[in-house]
Amino acid sequence: MRTTCFGLIFMLLCVSCGEHYDHEGKTPLVELNGNFLYREDLQSVLPPDLSKDDSLLFAENYIRNWAEDILLYDKACDNIPDNKEIDKLVDNYRRALIMHTYQQALIHQKLADEITEQELVDYYNNNQGLFKIDRPLIKGLFIKVPLTAPHIANVRRWYKSETSDAVEHLEKYQMRNAVKYEYFYDRWVPVSEVLGMMPLDKPDAEEYLNKNRHIELKDTAFYYFLNVNDYRPVGEQEPYEFARKHVKDMLLNLKQVVFMKDLKDGMYERAVKKNEIKFY
């Protein structure tokens, strides 16, 4: 059975009436040793779509955790009166966080748009050993239609062809009849994503896709058609278009190191010239 106290708290959360306090416009719910938990703060963390009972249970647990944290902190402060080391750690963390935030802003501003496509291609070509496929990749087309769908014979003919006419026919057909349609002749996708869309029951399903370019499957409700346009197994060179984001991240990291070193060196040299650094 819930206590009257928590029942009142729940009512404060659900209705706007009640006594309001001048706490910068917020309404206090609980006070402990001069610390206040406000209704607005509790509302901001309350998960949506909870039932009345679940909302009340969440409020109870949140308030209890809040109070326990206050009590433990106060107890710790009483028993650790010398906080110089903690203050030093907090200050060091704050300094590091501020510097990191500033560095990321500078890097985004100065470097993100300065990497050209040719630089990416050159880095990819000069470091091919870094870009090996760790999961099979595939290009192709997939369509899933109900057994009752019309013109299945046409679908069988269209999905095997990569001509613009065949693709256009499938595009129009899938709008009315397909349960799922994926066109990925123009991009590489992991084979596991394709296998997740079809009931291919083979001991080595990935290798099966490599050796069979036109695949038709059927279960109790659907036909599954897959045309494998291209396939890359594990261990081969990652196609550039698939590796491009990784290439850019790596090149950006390298430029970041050089950029930050030059920035720090320049700041230091200017400070020395202006006699801003005092050596004792």
Image (spheres, rainbow, N blue to C red):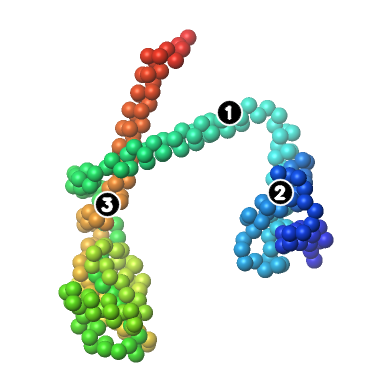
Neighbours of disc 3 within 10 Å: few (<14), some (14-19), many (20+): some
Asked whether the beta carbons under mark 1 and mark 2 sit within 8 Å of each other, the answer is no
Residue type (three-letter) at the residue carrying disc 2: Lys
Mark 3–mark 1 Cα distance, whole angstroms, equals: 43 Å
Q: Please name the residue shown 33% across and 32% down the image.
A: 259
Mark 1–mark 2 Cα distance, whole angstroms, equals: 33 Å
Q: Residue 26 carries which label?
A: 2
Q: Please name the residue shown 39% across and 21% down the image.
A: 268
Task: Please tell me whether residue 40 is drawn above or below residue 47 in the rendered image.
Answer: above
Q: Nearer the viewer, residue 164 or 144?
A: 164
| Residue 143, image x, y percentages | 30, 77
Q: Residue 88 carries which label?
A: 1
Choose the circle earlier in sequence order: 1 or 2. Answer: 2
| Residue 123, image x, y percentages | 22, 44
Choose the circle earlier in sequence order: 3 or 2. Answer: 2
Q: Residue 244 carries which label?
A: 3
Neighbours of disc 2 within 10 Å: few (<14), some (14-19), many (20+): some
Mark 3–mark 2 Cα distance, whole angstroms, equals: 50 Å
Give the number of the mark in front: 3 or 2: 2
Q: Can residue 267 be seen in this view?
A: yes
